Image: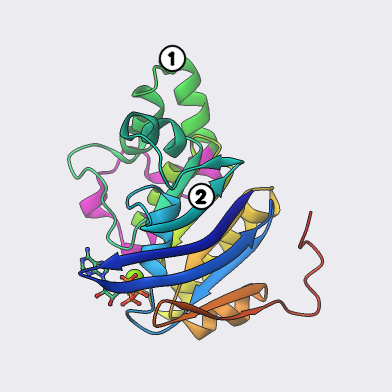
């Protein structure tokens, strides 16, 4: 469902990613690891069409997004969910309104939006804060809102960049459990992280980048979902 063929991306003539070949199948949970500057965020940005590669092809559900036209990007993004490290929630809107926004901009009726928003707020364990405004929430609660917002469209893939960035181990563990639940319900999940604790807790495929190159691609022996 996601395939990269010989993907290279330069910034200022230096390759942030170099000749990456990678396939991610439906239902997988993939961790992207590697030291700072390895190219993890760049890879997620390419999948989300926030950047375009200089060389190579990227197929997202059979569509080559490496040369996507700007007007097509929003349509593609509607089928993807993205969780940023800095929360990017609208501070003056309530939790409910933040999560409803992606649906309302697409013209979903307020009746259907309400039902869908309540469903994902419950799934993310944050429905009791639906009338709160993001600045009054804890970091873990804000991250739950972001995850709810990212899945409200029913995306086929959820991409997350350092979603447990500044969190203590307990909080990080809760957020990772939430990603595991979302994955168990059928959504493909790709998470970039530095955090070894996350790797142990998830215990699934780990793709490691080093200086823009694919350094390793490991699956635990018990990973039976690969290829589904
Ligand atoms: N917009 C940009 N302009 C110029 N160089 C960039 C830009 N974005 C990233 N880079 C460079 O590309 C390389 C890869 O950066 P990237 O952000 O993908 O790394 P990362 O693996 O996500 O690192 P971190 O773990 O610190 O988040 C780095 O050398 C970085 O300096
Ligand atoms: Mg990064």
Quadrant of the picture in which ligand 2 is shown: bottom left
Identify the secondary structure beneath mark 2: loop
Name the image quarter holding residue 16: bottom left
Residues drawn in magenta: 120-141
What residue appears at the point 50 percent right and 43 percent down from the top-left corner?
151
Task: Left or right? Give the position of 203 relative to 13.
Answer: right
- In this rendered view, identify the residue nearer to me: 60 or 18: 18
**Discs 2/1, front:** 1
Image quadrant in which the C terminus is located = bottom right
What crowding class fits label 2: few (fewer than 14 Cα within 10 Å), some (14-19), or many (20 or more)?
many
Which mark, residue 85?
none
Kindly report the distance in space between the C-alpha atoms of the residues bearing marks 2 and 1: 22 Å
Task: Left or right? Give the position of 13 relative to 153.
Answer: left
Where's residue 114, x and y in %? 45, 24
Residue 206 in magenta? no
**Sequence order check: which comes first, mark 2 or mark 1?**
1
Where's residue 25, x and y in %? 68, 55
Identify residue for label 1: 109
Which mark, residue 124?
2
């Amino acid at each position: 469902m996601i395939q990269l063929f010989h993907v290279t991306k330069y910034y200022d003539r230096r390759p942030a990613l170099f000749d990456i070949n990678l396939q991610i199948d439906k239902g997988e949970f993939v961790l992207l690891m590697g030291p700072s500057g390895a190219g993890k965020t760049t890879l997620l940005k390419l999948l989300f069409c926030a950047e375009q590669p200089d060389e190579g092809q990227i197929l997202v559900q059979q569509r080559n997004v490496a040369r996507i036209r700007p007007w097509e990007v929003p349509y593609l993004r509607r089928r993807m969910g993205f969780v940023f490290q800095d929360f990017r929630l609208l501070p003056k809107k309530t939790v409910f309104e933040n999560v409803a926004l992606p649906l309302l901009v697409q013209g979903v009726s307020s009746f259907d939006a309400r039902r869908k928003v309540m469903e994902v707020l419950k799934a993310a364990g944050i429905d009791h804060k639906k009338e709160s405004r993001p600045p009054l929430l804890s970091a873990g609660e804000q991250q739950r809102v972001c995850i709810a917002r990212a899945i409200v469209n029913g995306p086929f893939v959820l991409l997350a960049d350092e979603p447990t960035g500044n969190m203590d181990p307990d909080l990080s563990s809760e957020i990772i459990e939430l990603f595991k639940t979302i994955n168990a319900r059928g959504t493909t999940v790709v998470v970039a992280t530095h955090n070894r604790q996350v790797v142990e807790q998830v215990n699934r495929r780990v793709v490691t980048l080093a200086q823009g190159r694919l350094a390793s691609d490991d699956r635990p022996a018990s990973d039976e979902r690969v290829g589904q």
